[in-house]
Image (cartoon, helix red, strand yellow):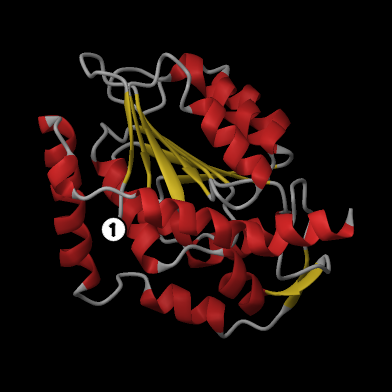
Amino acid sequence: MLIFLIIDLDIYPFIAYIRYWLKQEDRFSLQSPFLADLYTGLITYLKTNLSTEDPFSSQRKQLAEDHEKIQILDFGAGSKKLSSNFRKTSEIYKYSTSGRKFSTLYRYFCTQTPAIHVIELGTCVGINSLYLASATKGNLYTFEGSPTLLEKAKAINPFSQTSYIGGNIAETLPKHLNQDQTIDFALIDATHTYEATLSYFNSMLPFINDSSIIVVADIHWSKGMEKAWEEIIQNQTITLSLDFYECGVLFFRKGLTKSHYILAI
């Protein structure tokens, strides 16, 4: 049992990466004009944005230098690096937030939607919220279970279109969705369990349309997360799914032949 636990927590993402690396495809294998244009656009967007100064470098610096120890209320699988419920903000930033490349990738896919109703599940200290808010044309609703993390996120975010929703996401998300508003873009980056990831996806499914995009972070983080991803991409409403190892991207665009690609960036 102990060996299985060690493999699941420490070695499994590495094994998953080897499988991803062996299966990944290049742009020359993309037969769909829609996907070819989308992928080319992504590579260009990343190259352009990553060659300039990070627009949120000051917020990243602020969090990296914030050594205040705060108590975390965790409803999910927890952190593989930080076991205590009392954690330094700087350590949370280091181990539990996205790097600049994937934060920028999330922003790119948000720009590929109308971006009127944007949802982020798992605010953490608010890094991805900054990138998403900068692409949001309507309102960004970001959900977080831990009050102390929400306070850190609010302190670094200058975007007025950001609304923070605290509490157990299993309870707060359905209440929000009862407003019966189409979801344009959603980032699922919370809880990191098989059951919760499927639940969040299924809760949002009735509120998506042809132009919606859902991103699921950490799809190879554990066996449970990988299992959830494999089940999600089988859903018949999804016409295109992309695996970038650190995250998966889901499209519901009508007129596409259902397909799945493993791509490098």
Quarter of the image where one finds residue 239: top left
> Which of the image's four quarters has the C terminus?
bottom left
Above or below residue 111? Residue 65 is below
Q: Residue at x 47, y 52 (%)?
A: 19
Tell me the crowding category of disc 1: few under 14, some 14 to 19, or many 20 or more residues within 10 angstroms, Cα based: few
At 57% from the left and 85% from the top, the residue drawn is: 65
Q: Is residue 103 left or right of residue 153?
A: left
Instruction: Please identify the quarter of the rendering in which residue 238 is found.
Output: top left
Q: How far from the left and from the top, in percent, is residue 186?
A: 44, 36
Residue 88 position within the rendered picture, expressed as x and y whole percent measured from the top left: 71, 77
* Residue 180 in view (yes/no): no
Q: Quadrant of residue 38?
A: top left
Residue matched to label 1: 265
**In this image, 31 relative to 188: left or right?**
left
Q: Determine if residue 89 is in view.
A: yes
Q: Is residue 53 left or right of residue 138?
A: left
Q: Nearer the viewer, residue 204 or 196?
A: 196
Q: Position of residue 245 (x, y in %)?
A: 44, 52
Q: Is residue 60 left or right of residue 253?
A: right
At x 47% / y 59%, what residue is drawn?
Answer: 18
Image coords of residue 64 (percent x, y): 54, 81
Label 1's element?
loop
**As shown in the figure, which amino acid type bears the numbered disc 1?**
Ile
In the displayed orientation, state which residue is furthest to the right.
1
